[in-house]
């Protein structure tokens, strides 16, 4: 285990915010993570678990221990003619893992291509894109109890997945650190999903006659690159806010005032409204304020053009939140962790 003090966190967050972490432990094995738990190093309030840094906004220096999860490895734990169980270390890059699956013609995660971050962070907020959520392919999540270092396995049901949500953000928040994730992927008769967004049109534009998982992955990558800024070029954490979900009555009331409001029905009878549309209607899209702003092509993405402060980005987020609340009576919830 590699430990450091007074660490500049700029390379460890995709917003590109330069703040100082008091100490950092870079964990490369489950055993190292367990050892920290057994030694009582993970139970303090001043401990932050860091993966790829793609879902965090540092608004100030962090006066505590940052545990950087760098547990790698991909292992087929079982398979039959129809499916494969793939166990993946929490520190593996998520997009690289998706490409690994697509290359092996294992289906289920192709719509989640190019989502930034690590595998361990994926089940925490039940990442999703283009009509697919990771809960659909998770078989099991291995996690370490922060209070004593013991290992617990969570089944898909026990993870209690919701929209950008899980037990790890609710009842068991700050109790466990995810060490690996086991995915159940199809080997044949893939259930492809091309109904969301511009996937179908993009497949045609790219010359794909049939929606294979390889073609869908390519289409999703093409769409995301055309709409979203590369964090290596412009600091950002992807979607800053969740898409709000309204009950049917509230949505109908809103639609009476705003006839052209876009929406997507959910499985439980509610209605999801694109946060990007709400923000754009409030006039924020493309606005810049010194070194920070709202991306010109995607109103859901707040950006740091270089040298911006985390607290300034957070102040901008709260102003956007307030304006949407005033215009639509809808409260936007941040998808990003604010520290």
Image: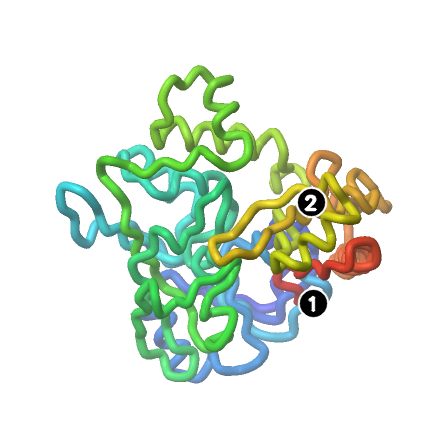
Find the residue positioned furthest to the top. 207
Whether residue 29 is visible = no
Disc 2: CA contacts within 10 A as few (<14), some (14-19) or many (>=20): many
Name the residue nearer the viewer: 44 or 214.
Answer: 214
Query: Residue visible at 13% across and 46% down?
Result: 80
Whether residue 268 is visible = yes
Image quadrant in which the C terminus is located? bottom right
- The image quadrant that residue 18 belongs to is bottom right
- In the shown orientation, is residue 67 left or right of residue 183? right
Using the image, determine if residue 217 lies above or below residue 144: above
Q: Nearer the viewer, mark 1 or mark 2?
A: 2
Dot 2: element: helix
The residue to which callout 2 is attached is 276
Find the residue positioned furthest to the left. 80
- The image quadrant that residue 60 belongs to is bottom right
Mark 1 and mark 2 lie on one chain; the one further toward the N terminus is 1
Q: Measured from the top left, where is residue 188 in percent x and y?
A: 22, 36
- In the shown orientation, is residue 79 left or right of residue 24? left
Query: Residue visible at 39% across and 26% down?
Result: 215
Using the image, determine if residue 99 lies above or below residue 246: above
- In the shown orientation, is residue 151 left or right of residue 61? left
Q: Measured from the top left, where is residue 12 in percent x and y?
A: 58, 54
Separation of marks 1 and 2 at Cα, in angstroms? 30 Å
Q: Measured from the top left, where is residue 134 in percent x and y?
A: 41, 52
Disc 1: CA contacts within 10 A as few (<14), some (14-19) or many (>=20): some
Dot 1: element: loop
Query: Residue visible at 66% across and 61% down?
Result: 333
Image quadrant in which the N terminus is located? bottom left
- The image quadrant that residue 161 belongs to is bottom left
Indicate the colouring scheme. rainbow
Q: Measured from the top left, where is residue 118 in percent x and y?
A: 46, 52
The residue to which callout 1 is attached is 61
């Amino acid at each position: 285990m590699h430990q450091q003090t007074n660490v500049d966190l700029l390379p460890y967050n995709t917003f590109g915010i330069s703040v100082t972490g008091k100490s950092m432990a870079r964990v490369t094995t489950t055993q190292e993570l367990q050892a920290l738990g057994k030694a009582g190093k993970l139970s303090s309030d001043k401990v932050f678990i860091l993966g790829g840094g793609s879902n965090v906004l540092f608004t100030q220096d962090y006066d505590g221990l940052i545990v950087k999860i760098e547990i790698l490895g991909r292992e087929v734990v079982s398979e039959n003619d129809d499916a494969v169980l793939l166990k993946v270390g929490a520190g593996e890059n998520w997009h690289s893992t998706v490409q690994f699956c697509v290359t092996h013609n294992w289906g289920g995660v192709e719509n989640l291509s190019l989502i930034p971050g690590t595998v361990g962070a994926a089940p925490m907020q039940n990442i999703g894109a283009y009509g697919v959520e990771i809960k659909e392919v998770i078989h099991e999540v291995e996690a370490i109890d922060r209070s004593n270092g013991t290992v617990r396995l969570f089944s898909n049901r026990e993870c209690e997945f919701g929209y950008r949500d899980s037990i790890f953000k609710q009842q068991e928040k700050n109790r466990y650190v995810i060490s690996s994730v086991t995915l159940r992927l199809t080997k044949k008769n893939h259930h492809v999903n091309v109904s969301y967004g511009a996937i179908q049109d993009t497949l045609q534009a790219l010359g794909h006659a049939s929606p294979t998982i390889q073609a869908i992955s390519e289409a999703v990558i093409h769409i995301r690159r055309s709409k979203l800024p590369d964090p290596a070029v412009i600091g950002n954490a992807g979607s800053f806010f969740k898409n709000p979900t309204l009950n049917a009555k509230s949505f109908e009331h809103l639609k009476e005032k705003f006839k052209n409001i876009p929406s997507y029905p959910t499985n439980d009878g509610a209605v999801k409204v694109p946060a990007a549309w709400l923000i754009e209607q409030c006039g924020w899209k493309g606005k810049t304020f010194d070194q920070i702003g709202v991306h010109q092509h995607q109103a859901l993405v707040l950006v740091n053009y270089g040298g911006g402060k985390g607290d300034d980005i957070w102040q901008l987020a709260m102003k956007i939140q307030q304006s949407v609340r005033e215009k639509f009576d809808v409260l936007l919830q941040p998808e990003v962790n604010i520290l």
